[in-house]
Amino acid sequence: MRILVTGASGFIGRHVVTELISAGHLVTALSRHASGLSEAADTGDRLCNLRADTLSDEARRAASEAEAIVHLAGRGNVQASFREPLEYNRLNAVGTLGKLGKDAKGAVKELGGVVEKDESTENRVTAAGVLAKLGADAKDAIPALARAAKQAAKDKNDLVKRAAESALEDVKAKKD
């Protein structure tokens, strides 16, 4: 089986890659960092190391070619996540859902509802980021994000308002 492992240079990722290769799978090991990627000599042609961000075109291409994805990538510094919540959301949550590719089309309507109505600010911000990532379905995402930004302004929720507006700009740019 052809398997993509994101976060392949991390502690768990390195072990997963090793086990998958040992089991005879073809593995693409994706990581933002060159250090820690497997350089084992006995992998033959079963390992392809790919240095890229999970949101990159290279990662999307690798995901579309894979039969399965083991997604372990993400930034893990908790203190930094409080200082940069939108950046952590972009990489961790949006990067994860960006792996859905062609299966994401059906998620747009549901995500629009989350951005507009969910009780959790965190869920609303995450859903807005995911909608921005899924810009191919702009005709459905644009009205949902516009309603979400308007509702967030009414609720005086600046974080959701900024996330929805930013996502709306991203989706509109992808549409053009």
Image (cartoon, helix red, strand yellow):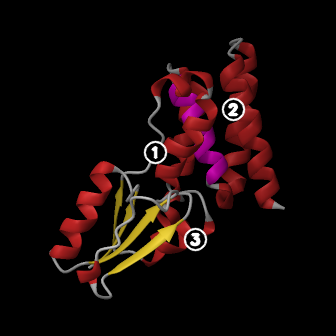
Left or right: where does residue 165 sit relative to residue 101?
right
| Amino acid carrying mark 1 in the image | Gly
Instruction: Measure the alpha-carbon separation of dots 2 and 1.
Output: 20 Å
- In the picture as drawn, the residue positioned furthest to the bottom comes out as 45
Left or right: where does residue 49 sit relative to residue 112?
left
Foreground: 36 or 20? 36
Q: Which residue in the structure is indicated by mark 3?
A: 58
| Amino acid carrying mark 2 in the image | Ala
Alpha-carbon neighbours of circle 1 within 10 Å: few (<14), some, or many (≥20)? Answer: many
Q: Nearer the viewer, mark 2 or mark 1?
A: 1
Specify which label sits upstream in the sequence, 2 or 1: 1
Residue drawn at (67%, 61%), measured in percent from left and top?
136
The magenta stretch is 122-133
In this picture, is 23 found above or below 54? below
Residue 74 is marked as 1
Q: Which residue in the structure is indicated by mark 2?
A: 163
* Whether residue 127 is visible: no
In this picture, is 170 found above or below 176? above
Local secondary structure at mark 2: helix
The chief SS type of the magenta part is: helix
| Amino acid carrying mark 3 in the image | Glu
Quadrant of the drawing holding the C terminus? bottom right
Image spot of residue 3 (x, y percent):
33, 72
**Residues at badges 3 and 2 in contact (C-beta under 8 Å)?**
no
Local secondary structure at mark 3: helix
Left or right: where does residue 67 sit relative to residue 156?
left
Instruction: Measure the alpha-carbon separation of dots 1 and 3.
Output: 17 Å
